[in-house]
Image (cartoon, rainbow, N blue to C red):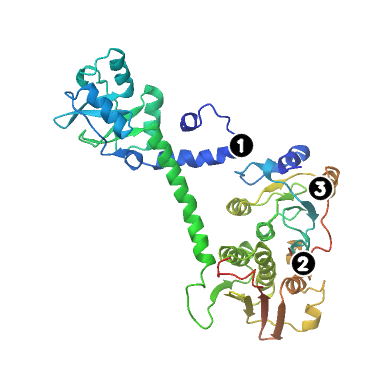
Amino acid sequence: MNLQDIITKLDLKTLSSVEKDLSSNKPACGYSSDLLSCVMAGAPKKSIWITLQAHGNIIAVATLLDLSAVIITEGAIPDETTIEKANEEGVVLLSTSLPTYAVVGQLWEMGLRTSDPDQPCS
Amino acid sequence: MPQDTLFKGKLVSEQKAEDITRVEELAYELKVEEVMTANPSTVTPETTMGDVLVLFRQTRISGAPVLENGHLVGLVSIEDLLRCLQKSDLESETRHYMSTKLLTIKKNEPVIEALKLFVSSHYGRLPVVDDDGNLLGILTKGDITSGILQAMQHDYQEEEVRRYRASHLFEDIESDRSSLILRYSIKQGDFTHGGSASSAIKRALLRLGATPQIARRVGIAVYEAEMNLIIHTTHGGLIRCEIEPKQISINITDDGPGIQDIALALKPGYSTASDTVRELGFGAGMGLVNIQRCVDSMRLESVFGQGTILRLKIFLSQEDSVGEGS
């Protein structure tokens, strides 16, 4: 499963301008939380992060963790500077009007699971 | 247009499209004189076609400009030579076979203009001239292809060289103890730039040859400390990251307000963050816990009313060392 499949299946809106072919972006697993420190601790690299936070700091988090993509739920729209920052850092920023629970459920059904909970910082 | 010419007849995948963009860019950036063959072999209208044959064979070219008293009057190509051979007319002078319907290109035109001419005219080569019409060189499609390939190779090498230099930073510097110090001032309340310092440090470490795991651990630890400065301090503070081949030491200092109860501050889930900050997703009370998890040693000192200093160390094994090559 690749990011393009996920975007099509869940009808996600792409907010950042993406140059690379998204079908070569293959997320490893999923993670959801709106508390940034939990994300820092729990989201493995190449995971998709589902959150309703839409402020600029989510880009720093996504960059530091090498996330595959960020899905912003409940129709929250980040401001221009956040999207600009995403473009600068090459972060794939997606949006949907669905609530987090629905997105997570659909991703799980598509086969995207959690990672090993004991996995340390790497 | 340019990709039609360069990738003619080939299916272009989405992934390739990115590379084409650079090729296109180069077709606009590169000037004709940068890719042309300068000082080409020339002939005169009186040269016999037999001599042209010898010249083409010896120099392995397929066309030559024809000059009369230094002025460009024609172009003789392998196609003309074939016509001549068909008639067994090698004694004849070049003037009878050369083409005089000339298309030239100026030396300072971008390569893209030459490509357009090649497509519209079906000519195989174009004489390159200066503003006064003097011959400077000759341009074929092959010249353009190798010119673009060379430029792309150059692009790639530049980044390689930069990375290579950084990853060997400490090798050529002699001292009893060499280190690289990165400093960042963090402003209180500056959520817009939150994460900039940690991202910059992570990038620097990767350039220096750190493994992705090390860069990630340092990135997470510094991020949490950086956000603490933004959220909890009176005036912000300083991040000082000292990189040595075998260890990375990060000191984060501020001048207040200081932590009242350090043991409590270290407790997972404990936070003094305001409701507004919590709404942004901060203040989970996991910051210091995260830092501790990512570093090899952490010391937190604070005097309430004066300030806080957080000292972090990450030790690198022989294989993980930075700035000493691989």
User: What amino acid does circle 3 point to?
Assistant: Leu
| Quadrant assignment, res B18 | top right
Q: Which corner quadrant of the image does residue A35 belong to? A: bottom right
> Which three-letter amino acid code belongs to the residue tagged 1?
Glu
Residue B24 in view (yes/no): yes
Number of marks present in the image shown = 3
In the rendered image, which quarter is residue B56 located in? top left
Viewer-side residue, B249 vs B51 = B51
| Camera-side residue of B137 and B274 | B137
Q: Is residue A110 above or below residue A89?
A: above
Label 3, label 2: how many angstroms apart (C-alpha)? Answer: 33 Å
User: Which dot marks residue A112?
Assistant: 3
The kind of secondary structure element at disc 1 is: helix
> Which residue is labeled 1 in the image?
B14
Query: At 69% across and 70% down in the image, what residue appears?
Result: B221
- Badges 2 and 1, same chain: yes
Is residue A71 shown above or below B235?
Answer: above
Q: Are labels 3 and 2 on one chain?
A: no
Residue B108 seen: no
Task: Tell me which residue sits at (67%, 77%) in the image.
Answer: B313
Up-down: is B285 above or below B44? below
Q: Residue at x 27, y 14 (%)?
A: B88
Going from N to C along the chain, the mark reached first, 2 or 1, is: 1
Quadrant the C terminus of chain B occupies: bottom right
Question: Which disc number belongs to residue B275?
Answer: 2
- Please state the horizontal and vertical placement of residue B199, each as a whole percent of the image: 61, 63
Spatial separation of the CA atoms under disc 1 and disc 3: 25 Å
> Which of the two marks, 2 or 1, is nearer to us in this view?
1
